[in-house]
Amino acid sequence: MKERVLIKDLRNNVGNKVTIAGWVSVRRNQGKMVFFDFRDATGTIQGVVLPASSAMEEAKKLRTEYVVAVEGVVVKRGEKNVQKERENGDLEIRIESIATLNTSETPPFDVTSDTSGIGEETRLDYRYLDLRTLRMQKNIRMRSDFVRRVREFLFRKSFAEIETPLLTESTPEGSRDFVVPSRLHPGSFYALPQAPQQYKQLLMVAGFEKYFQIARAVRDEDLRADRGFEHSQVDIEMSFVEEDDVMDLVEEMMTEACEGMGFCLKEKPFPRFTYAEAVAKFGADKFDLRTEEDKAKGILAFAFVYKFPFFEKTDPSTDSGQASAWTFTHNPFSKTVAEHSEWLMQNKNIGEILTMQYDLVCNGYETGGGSIREHRPEYLKSVYKIMGYTENEIEERVGHMLKAFTYGAPPHGGIALGIERILMTLTGEKYLREVQAFPMTRGGQTAVMKAPKPLTQKQLLELGLSVNKTEGK
């Protein structure tokens, strides 16, 4: 193939012979002439095979979604033929030769149109075709653009990007873990991380002071339109900070990223409401500050909610594994507000203890959450005692954290921002699957590939596992 020119660069090549490569979106055979719409990752262009062209024989063989390399001259279309509503509607390629690089079966749906009305099972079974559509290309590229802007911002602020393990210890707090059996330690299991929470705090103990990563988080929880088994988050932790420091940094980062992508923010600085104020004013701790006119214009309305209750009553209908009637609302590693620290240590007024936790909300979604962490081991221990854990249970669950905090742990805090939730607000999509490349179905099956599925007997033997199948399950 001769040196390829991207479709987005054709405007700079009017009058030149070029080679483009991509897919056939539309084929229109008008007898003596054949017209095509070609597309690559950067745009679309019309091409025409004139009657005398040596490419005519190959052109008549082409069908939609064939992969081709096309050589021809870029020309300006006559004034009467300009299609102003179309991308590159004033340009055309006069095709001189066509090389078919691959053929295609007829797709199960039209990839040149919006597939949001197509059944979920079909779309995810053929996700590689669904992702060819203009809407999905826009969504996934917008996701990439957002992550790039966030990453560049944090690097400028002297953050270090550090990866944390995917195979870790199972902990009973939070959602259910996805577990991985160990071949080398039969009968023992790793867990996939629900969040890098403990590791990022240990990085603060390690003296890095400013950490971030684009982290994958895996949670076995009930699936919803805005929640899946897997998600990605912008994970941030800083040492020697207070609540305002974290919220100010996040506000600056989100403002820069979103405005840089062409979005308009309703209010700057972002409004801040205590949890009590939010519930009194909006009836919930996540809310939409936009007017109907704001929604029509695609405006983003960010706000912070802070000073959450630390503890809530446990649900007696669930087996929490705790002896106490109390559990944490957000995160057991959070720090109380200063005036309630003694209540924590004295096990008093549990339901009234407030914590330095904060959420970022946007357009009715909770898009991020974090807190100033408790870096003093005796206070963290008190949290677990309030939740009913014995000394031995505390040691089993967080003994490594308590030990680490005895070696000069600095005050620290951070936040995790849900990339999918943020992209849903940016794109206006209502379902998480519209902003993930390969999401799962509502029944928990993977896109394209067939998981979950049984292991082979050989695999089970290697892992020292046996499976008891329940009738009807």
Image (tube, rainbow, N blue to C red):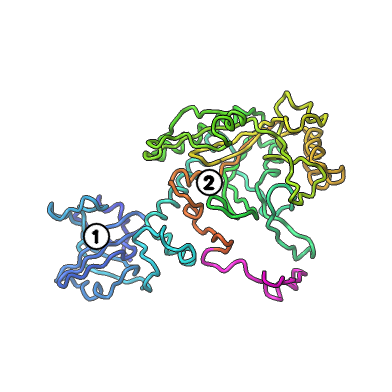
Question: Whole-percent x and y of residue 415?
Answer: 61, 38
| Residue type pointed to by label 2 | Ile
**Quadrant for the C terminus in the image:** bottom right
Residue ID at (76%, 51%): 319
Question: Whole-percent x and y of residue 216?
Answer: 60, 51
Does residue 245 appear left or right of residue 409 in this picture? left
- Dot 1 or dot 2: first in sequence order is 1
Residue ID at (76%, 69%): 465
The Cα–Cα distance between marks 1 and 2, rounded to whole angstroms, is 36 Å
Which residue bears the numbered disc 1? Answer: 46
Quarter of the figure with residue 340: top right
Please state which of the two labelled residues, at mark 1 or mark 2, is closer to the viewer.
Answer: 2
| Residue type pointed to by label 1 | Gln
Q: How many marks?
A: 2
Does residue 196 appear left or right of residue 448 in this picture? right
Task: Judge whether residue 406 can be spotted in this image.
Answer: no
Does residue 204 appear left or right of residue 305 in this picture? right
Question: Whole-percent x and y of residue 448?
Answer: 51, 66
In the displayed structure, 430 sits above or below 123; it is above
Which residue bears the numbered disc 2? Answer: 419
- Relative depth, front residue between 272 and 413: 272
Mark 1 element type? strand
- Relative depth, front residue between 472 and 201: 472
Question: Whole-percent x and y of residue 39?
Answer: 32, 60
Which range is magenta?
Answer: 447-473
Task: Judge whether residue 123 can be spotted in this image.
Answer: yes
Residue ID at (75%, 73%): 461
Quarter of the figure with residue 105: bottom left
- Relative depth, front residue between 129 and 341: 341
Mark 2 element type? helix
